Image: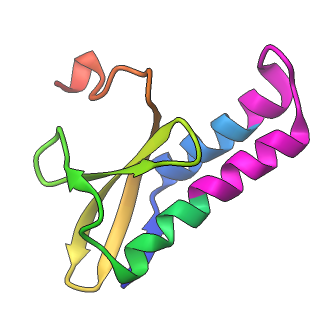
Amino acid sequence: MRVELSGGAQDDLDWIERYIGELGHSPNQAIARRTADRVLQALGILEHFPHAGRPGRVGGTRELNISTAPYFAVYRFVADDHIVVTAIVHDRQQYPPMDDA
């Protein structure tokens, strides 16, 4: 199974890393990089277990809880052998956003 990040999901991951590394209460580049690595590592499970996530809150999507970080990934199948991660969302964020509901 091929797993790729959409542009939006890559932006989410970049923002997470920037926030933790530069903008948060206790900015820390090492923790920021580890968090991004944990997210990417968790997404790797989809290569072998594409249905590991639960049915998503948005039709046609699934959501994978990232147990090593307070995030979940939203993904969809675009072909029998291809998954696109469309968003990486903090557990405390409103999802789907109010304007997308």
Which stretch is magenta? 18-39
Is residue 41 within the magenta segment? no
User: Is 38 within the magenta?
Assistant: yes
Residue 37 higher or lower than 31, as above or below: below
Residue at x 58%, y 54% (from the top left corner):
39
Note whether 17 is above or below 75 in the view shown.
above
- Residue 49 is situated, as x and y percent measured from the top left of the image, at 33, 76
Identify the main secondary structure in magenta. helix
Q: Where is residue 73 in the image (x, y as percent from the top left)?
A: 41, 49
Residue 62, percent from left and from top = 23, 54
Q: Is residue 28 above or below residue 9?
A: above
Identity of the residue drawn at 38% across and 83% down:
48
Viewport quadrant of the N terminus: bottom left
Q: Which residue is drawn at 28% across and 86% down?
A: 81
Q: Quadrant of the C terminus?
A: top left
Q: In this view, does 20 lie above or below 51?
A: above
Task: Identify which residue is drawn at 25% across, 16% down.
Answer: 98
